[in-house]
Image (cartoon, helix red, strand yellow):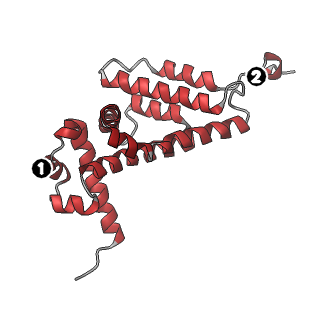
């Protein structure tokens, strides 16, 4: 029997995650039945659960995948850029990502087992945000009168508020200036005499 290449396995895993993202976003965790997952991924349950132990493992992998994508953007451009991408629909799967994020929030409130498993994985975004903020502080671009942990918590709170705003279907086309204000809030402001040309 020929061996399956790693590229094939990776492509199949990506196919499952992409289909599951749509399924969970449309139907929620409870409504994403095995039959619906099969339809969304165009694969059999055997193929799906060859890669993921069960539905919860699949959902956690999906949420972790989304968090890793966000962490990559944060590392390069900051957490505010993640928010700008959501507003511009510039992320790869903006509506589906939002659905997954909302389902994670719901399950964190209602499912202690999920909360424990998610806690092990959720630090990735916070860690990336703090590292980015430290680099910005070292470069002299970040205000130095507020602890980096507080600034990271502030930005994450704004992200959660934006997710809630979008989830309620409220208009978002005028939120660019709000994100400008958020970005300006964490920047270092040099004294007027420092920036006035001689």
- Is residue 170 visible in the rendered image? The answer is yes
**Which x, y percent locates residue 13?**
30, 59
What residue lies at 55% left-to-right and 22% top-to-bottom? 182
**Which x, y percent locates residue 107?**
31, 35
The outermost residue toward the left is: 35
> Do tag 1 and tag 2 residues touch (Cβ < 8 Å)?
no
Name the residue tied to disc 2.
190
Q: Secondary structure at mark 2?
A: loop
Judged left or right of residue 111, residue 198 is: right
User: Which-is-in-front pick, marks 1 and 2?
Assistant: 1
Judged left or right of residue 49, residue 9 is: right
What residue lies at 34% left-to-right and 37% top-to-bottom? 104
Judged left or right of residue 122, residue 103 is: left
Label whose residue precedes the other's in the sequence (1 or 2): 1
The outermost residue toward the right is: 198
What residue lies at 22% left-to-right and 37% top-to-bottom? 28
Q: Give 20 or 141, whichever is nearer the viewer.
A: 20
User: Badge 2 local density, few (<14 within 10 Å), some, or many (20+)?
Assistant: few
The outermost residue toward the bottom is: 1
Q: Secondary structure at mark 1?
A: helix
**Which x, y percent locates residue 92?**
36, 42
Above or below, comparing residue 18 to residue 45 in the picture: above
Name the residue tied to disc 1.
35
Where residue 140 sits, quadrant-wise, is top right
């Amino acid at each position: 029997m020929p061996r399956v290449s790693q590229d094939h396995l990776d492509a199949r895993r990506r196919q499952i995650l992409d289909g599951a993202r749509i399924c969970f976003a449309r139907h929620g965790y409870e409504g994403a039945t095995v039959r619906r997952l099969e339809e969304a991924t165009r694969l059999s349950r055997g193929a799906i659960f060859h890669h993921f132990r069960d539905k919860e493992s699949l959902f956690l992998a999906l949420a972790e995948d989304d968090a890793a994508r966000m962490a990559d953007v944060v590392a390069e451009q900051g957490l505010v850029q993640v928010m700008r991408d959501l507003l511009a629909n510039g992320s790869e799967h903006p509506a589906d990502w939002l659905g997954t994020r909302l389902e994670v929030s719901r399950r964190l409130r209602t499912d202690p087992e999920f909360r424990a498993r998610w806690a092990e994985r959720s630090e990735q975004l916070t860690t990336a945000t703090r590292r980015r903020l430290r680099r910005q502080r070292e470069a002299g671009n970040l205000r130095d009168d507020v602890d980096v942990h507080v600034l990271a918590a502030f930005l994450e709170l704004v992200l959660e508020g934006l997710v809630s705003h979008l989830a309620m279907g409220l208009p978002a086309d005028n939120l660019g200036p709000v994100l400008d204000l958020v970005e300006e809030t964490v920047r270092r402001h040099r004294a007027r005499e420092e920036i006035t040309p001689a």
